[in-house]
Image (cartoon, rainbow, N blue to C red):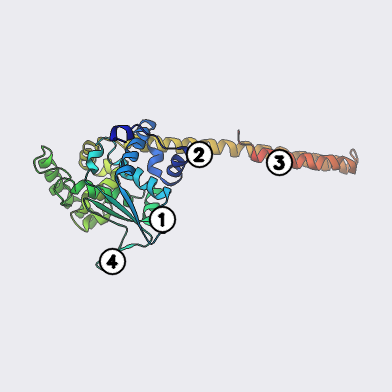
């Protein structure tokens, strides 16, 4: 199939369920971007070879999750951004380089990922850590000149001076913020190497857009232009959904408490009537099952 044909393909319900269960970022995406993402994922899965290290097979969950997170970065950039990418290797154990353990590694053509690190990064969508976004941001950074230097545009790009100026100004500011203990939005790993600045900023852009916009607005704006996306409304929509769910849960809890009170009152009245010998023991043969069913029904009814 051609790229144009693949871009029109959709995921199955089972594949969508994998993402809804595993990816906080996927769940925040607006429906139109989810549709666009599915087409890009089909291109990714068609053109990229998956390999494994320590696993007996590469599962459907692995392929779908990696493809989805990676393709979020190119939703409005197009698949040509990954035209040089050839292979993704999923490892059971943490990657080891120079005596240290790593969650991932990326070059222009290959990406290695520790699967447990992938799952952790996808599940918690606001912890500033997503190893898949991080490593595929490295791919984008190296796409034009094979150098990971946190300037993800070609040397002859009209945007190159803007990126160079931003890096020279913002990188020292982030260092100073950490040193002084001031509020910040980008995780400290960005300071381990200049090449990590763009990738960690990308994680913040998608996972903590509100904080990045507040503390590093120029970084947010340049990433917004680069990716052609604005995650801030997604985050606000998610916060609104969470608030609505909390209100609904509070309402259901209140109604269930009322029904529990009604049930307790009925039991108290029944026992009082029995004490006055207004009702006999035979009455309770019928009363107890009905009372018990009333409690079960009131506490499990989903439409409250």
Give the quadrant of the C terminus: top right
Q: Which mark is residue 100?
A: 4
Question: Which badge, 3 or 1, is on the more N-terminal residue?
Answer: 1
Query: What residue does disc 3 label?
Result: 295
User: Label 4's element?
Assistant: strand
Observer-side mark, 4 or 2, equals 4
Question: Which badge, 4 or 2, is on the more N-terminal residue?
Answer: 4
Query: What residue does disc 2 label?
Result: 246
In the rendered view, does 22 fall on the left or right side of 205? Answer: right
Disc 2/disc 1 C-alpha distance (Å): 40 Å
Foreground residue among 79 and 105 = 79
Disc 3/disc 2 C-alpha distance (Å): 23 Å
Q: Which mark is residue 180?
A: none
Disc 4/disc 3 C-alpha distance (Å): 57 Å
Residue at the bottom extreme, as displayed: 99
In the rendered view, does 242 fall on the left or right side of 300? Answer: left
Q: Is residue 130 above or below residue 302?
A: below
Question: Which badge, 2 or 1, is on the more N-terminal residue?
Answer: 1
Q: Position of residue 191 (x, y in %)?
A: 21, 56
User: Label 1's element?
Assistant: loop
The answer to whether residue 274 shows anywhere in this view is yes
Disc 1/disc 4 C-alpha distance (Å): 26 Å
Q: Which mark is residue 57?
A: 1
Observer-side mark, 4 or 3, equals 4
Question: Which badge, 3 or 2, is on the more N-terminal residue?
Answer: 2
């Amino acid at each position: 199939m051609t790229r144009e044909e693949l871009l029109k393909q959709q995921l199955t319900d089972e594949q969508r369920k994998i993402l809804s269960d595993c990816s906080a970022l996927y769940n925040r995406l607006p429906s139109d971007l989810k549709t666009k993402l599915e087409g890009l994922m089909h291109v990714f899965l068609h053109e990229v070879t998956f390999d494994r290290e320590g696993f007996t097979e590469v599962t459907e969950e692995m392929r779908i999750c990696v493809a989805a997170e990676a393709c979020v970065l190119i939703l409005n950039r197009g698949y040509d951004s990954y035209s040089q990418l050839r292979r993704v290797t999923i490892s059971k154990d943490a990657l080891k380089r120079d005596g240290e353990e790593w969650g991932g590694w990326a070059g222009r053509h290959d990406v290695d990922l520790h699967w447990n690190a992938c799952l952790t990064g996808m599940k918690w969508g606001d912890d500033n850590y997503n190893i898949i976004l991080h490593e595929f941001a490295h791919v984008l950074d190296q796409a034009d000149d094979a150098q990971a230097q946190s300037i993800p545009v070609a040397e002859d790009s009209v945007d190159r001076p803007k990126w160079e100026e931003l890096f020279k100004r913002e990188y020292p500011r982030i260092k100073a913020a950490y040193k002084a203990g001031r509020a910040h939005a980008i995780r400290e790993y960005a300071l381990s190497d200049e090449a990590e600045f763009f990738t960690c900023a990308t994680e913040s852009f998608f996972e903590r857009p509100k904080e990045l916009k507040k503390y590093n607005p120029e970084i947010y704006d340049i990433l917004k232009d680069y990716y052609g996306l604005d995650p801030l409304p997604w985050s606000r929509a998610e916060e609104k959904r969470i608030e609505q769910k909390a209100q609904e849960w509070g309402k259901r809890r209140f109604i269930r408490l009322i029904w529990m009170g009604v049930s307790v009152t009925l039991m108290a009245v029944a026992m009082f009537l029995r004490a006055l010998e207004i009702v006999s023991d035979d009455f309770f043969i019928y009363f107890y099952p009905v009372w018990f069913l009333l409690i079960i029904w009131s506490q499990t009814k989903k439409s409250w």
